[in-house]
Amino acid sequence: MSQEELDDLVAEGVVEPVAPDPETARIELEQARLHIESSAEIAERDPVAAFAIGYDAIRKALSAHMRDHGYRVTKGKGHHARTGRYAIAALDDPRLEEHLEAFDELRQLRNQSEYDAVLLGFEDVSDALARADAIISAVEKDLEEDR
C-alpha cells in the first residue's frame, strides 16, 4: 500500500479517512465470496445478472479493504470509479495490477448492460468471476495479515 498515493486521493477528495471497521469489512468480504458462487450458478441462464453480481463481488471486496483500513469513498457521482482508484493505490501487488485496472472496464461494461441494454455473454461473466476471485483472495490475504 502506498501511503503517499492514498494521501493524494484524500487530498483530491476521492476518499476520506474514517474509523476502521474490521467487522463490517469481514461481512462485506463474506458477501463478495457468496456473490461469486451465486453468479456462477446463473451465468449460463442469465449472464447479464450474473455479470452484475460478479462485478458487485469485486466492488464489495474493495469496499471491505477500505473499511478495514479506515477509508471510504466520498459522496457524489463516480462512487465506483473512485473505488477503483483507491484499489490501484492501496493494493500494491503486481499480480493484481491487470485485475485492478480491468475493474474500470468491468464497471463500464456493467453500466452499458444496465443503462443501454447491452447484452453480455458467458465469456464476460467468466472473465469477471476470474478477476473477482483474484481480487477477493488478495483482499482476504491482506486483511488476515493485518490481524
Image (cartoon, helix red, strand yellow):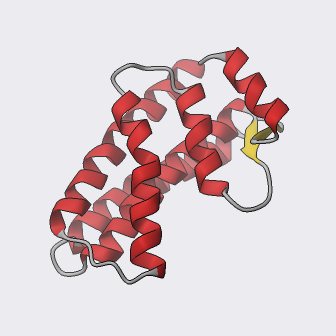
Direction from residue 106 to residue 61 in the image, left or right = right
Q: Position of residue 79 (x, y in %)?
A: 67, 56
Direction from residue 64 to residue 51 in the image, left or right = left
Is the residue 43 above or below the residue 81 in the image?
below
Residue at 59%, 27% in the rendered image: 89
Q: Position of residue 124 (x, y in %)?
A: 24, 61
Residue at 38%, 19% in the rendered image: 94
Residue at 33%, 78% in the rendered image: 118
Q: Position of residue 34 (x, y in %)?
A: 38, 59
Image quarter of residue 141: top left
Residue at 29%, 60% in the rendered image: 37
Is the residue 54 above or below the residue 2 in the image?
below
Image quarter of residue 126: bottom left
Is the residue 146 above or below the residue 57 in the image?
above
Q: Is residue 56 visible?
A: yes
Is the residue 86 above or below the residue 42 in the image?
above
Q: Position of residue 59 (x, y in %)?
A: 52, 52
